[in-house]
Amino acid sequence: MLTRTVIATPGAALPVGPYSQAIAAGDFVFVAGEKGIDPATNKIVEGGIAAETRQTLENIKAILAAAGLGLDRVVRSVVYMTDLGRFGEMNAVYAEYFPQDPPGRSCVQVVALPAGAHVEIEVTAAR
């Protein structure tokens, strides 16, 4: 039987709906789509795509730490953006967090994201 464990931390933004920050199942941790929400204010950070991307990845980092993992364990990510014209700005920050052997990644443009976000990232990490 597969063990399923909820991962939660106050070090990342609280979910904006009925979902967990992450679920550990088997050898993997599945982090829900995170946004650039500051956990101290529960609001999207100001400063544009770069600031939102940085806060999003800090939230992901905190969730993975709660699971006993780091960003180096991420094997897959999906980036959702409301404007792919800002891809370069997002990508520059993303590259700072995954400087070597980055995970497989998809990036898609969407019409809108919850909480007024302009970027959302979900990741899967291996234990």
Image (cartoon, rainbow, N blue to C red):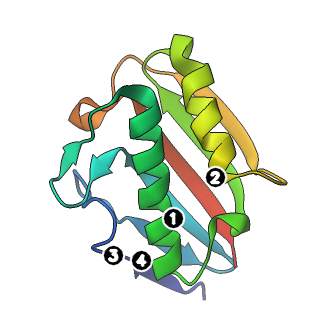
Foreground mark, 4 or 3, reads: 3
Q: Secondary structure at mark 1?
A: helix
**Local crowd size for mark 3, using a 10 Å CA cut-off: few (<14), some (14–19), many (≥20):** some
Q: Residue at x 58, y 54 (%)?
A: 123
The residue closer to the viewer here, 19 or 123, is 123
Amino acid type at mark 1: Lys
- Which numbered disc, 2 or 1, marks the residue that appears first in the sequence? 1
Give how far apart the Cα atoms at labels 4 and 3 are: 7 Å
- Which numbered disc, 2 or 3, marks the residue that appears first in the sequence? 3
Give how far apart the Cα atoms at labels 4 and 2 are: 21 Å
Image-based side of 3 in relation to 10, left or right: right
The residue beneath circle 2 is 97
The x, y position of residue 102, in whole percent, is 78, 50
The residue beneath circle 1 is 61
The residue beneath circle 4 is 7
Give how far apart the Cα atoms at labels 3 and 1 are: 11 Å
Q: Secondary structure at mark 2?
A: helix
Query: Residue pushed farthest left?
Result: 41
The residue beneath circle 3 is 9
- Which numbered disc, 1 or 4, marks the residue that appears first in the sequence? 4
Image quadrant for the N terminus?
A: bottom right
Q: Residue at x 58, y 71 (%)?
A: 29
Image-based side of 36 in relation to 25, left or right: left
Foreground mark, 4 or 2, reads: 2
Give how far apart the Cα atoms at labels 1 and 4 are: 12 Å
Amino acid type at mark 3: Thr
**Local crowd size for mark 1, using a 10 Å CA cut-off: few (<14), some (14–19), many (≥20):** many
Give how far apart the Cα atoms at labels 2 and 1 are: 9 Å
Image-based side of 2 in relation to 98, left or right: left
Amino acid type at mark 4: Ile
The x, y position of residue 52, in whole percent, is 39, 38
Q: Secondary structure at mark 4?
A: strand
